[in-house]
Amino acid sequence: MATDAHITHFAHPQHRLLKTPYSSASRHVCDICEAKLSGLVGYRCNACDFDIHEACADYFKETISFFAHPWHTLTLCRMPPENKGWVCDLCMEHCPPGNFVYRCIQCKFDVHPLCTLLPQTIRSPLHPLHDLNMVPSSGHCNACPERLPVWHYICGPCTSPSYRLHIGCVSGAPSGVGQGSGGTTNQNNSSSRGQGTGNTSSGANQTTSDARNTTAVVERSRSTSVSKFLLKKSFMIAIDLATGGLASPVLDVLQAVLD
Ligand SMILES: [Zn+2]
Ligand SMILES: [Zn+2]
Ligand SMILES: [Zn+2]
Ligand SMILES: [Zn+2]
Ligand SMILES: [Zn+2]
Ligand SMILES: [Zn+2]
């Protein structure tokens, strides 16, 4: 095998990785994005059973600056074994020990690699007049009856009443997160307490009761549910804008896996 078929990658510095075409029957999963490699090209360490998509090897960096945690650099590393039950600060789904996350160890801020693709600003077909921004706050979703986790999309200009959406409700169709009876607007958020204060602790407590309803869906196919809304048109447009098109090979991979 020619030596140029090997690369070194920060996600697995112990060994060189071999460029590998995965068969369509392959059951290997990318260690970074957790999506399947079947029918795609990736890099593999056979000794450690470590695999990553070529697109993920190119796109994901060892350290990033991220709008949801502007104070510190986040580093791609494996969730330590003692951090059982920890969740992604953005999507609130699990980050199992051993899986890759972008972390600020100092602040205990963790986010799935795929969730770093979530754009800070997005335009939703449900609220076409204004951009929505992802900021920490609390309140109820305008598209479904579920309470919102700390991180969700809010319209800046619309303040009374406020307009807020789950990440999973932005594209219009319920997709795992905040899935409800669908379409009906929820007008029972009589107060807008905590808006813009950055006080995230009350919001975090509120989400625990909702989590019970969605956990079953979410745990079955976490990476699939994240991918599904990243692949919605409104997200793809916003991600392209935010990354200058650099993330499109990763979106192509997610698309190929879902097809
Ligand atoms: Zn990947
Ligand atoms: Zn290895
Ligand atoms: Zn996440
Ligand atoms: Zn930090
Ligand atoms: Zn919602
Ligand atoms: Zn608005």
Image (spheres, rainbow, N blue to C red):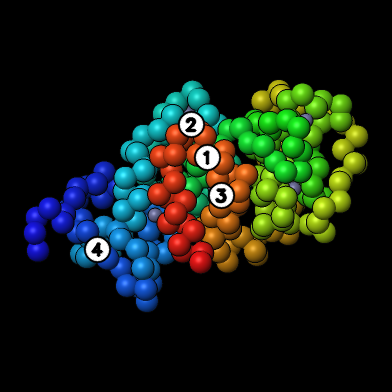
- Rounded to the nearest angstrom, the CA distance separating label 1 from label 3 is 8 Å
Q: Are marks 1 and 3 in contact (CB under 8 Å)?
A: yes
Q: Quick one: quadrant of the N terminus?
A: bottom left
- Rounded to the nearest angstrom, the CA distance separating label 3 from label 4 is 26 Å
Look at the image and tell me whether residue 24 can be seen.
yes
Q: Which residue type does callout 4 highlight?
A: Thr
Of mark 2 and mark 3, the one earlier in the sequence is 2
- Residue 173 location, quadrant: bottom right
Q: Which residue type does callout 1 highlight?
A: Ile
Of mark 1 and mark 3, the one earlier in the sequence is 3
- Residue 129 location, quadrant: top right
Q: Are marks 3 and 4 in contact (CB under 8 Å)?
A: no
- Secondary structure of the residue carrying numbered label 3: helix
Q: Is mark 1 within 8 Å of ligand 3?
A: no
Q: Which numbered disc covers residue 239?
A: 1
Labels 2, 3: front one: 3
Q: How many numbered discs sit on the rendered protein?
A: 4
- Secondary structure of the residue carrying numbered label 2: loop
Q: Are marks 2 and 1 in contact (CB under 8 Å)?
A: no
Of mark 2 and mark 1, the one earlier in the sequence is 2
- Residue highlighted by disc 2: 66
Determine crowd level at label 1: few under 14, some 14-19, many 20+ residues with C-alpha closer than 10 A: many
Of mark 3 and mark 4, the one earlier in the sequence is 4
- Rounded to the nearest angstrom, the CA distance separating label 2 from label 3 is 17 Å
Q: Which residue type does callout 3 highlight?
A: Leu
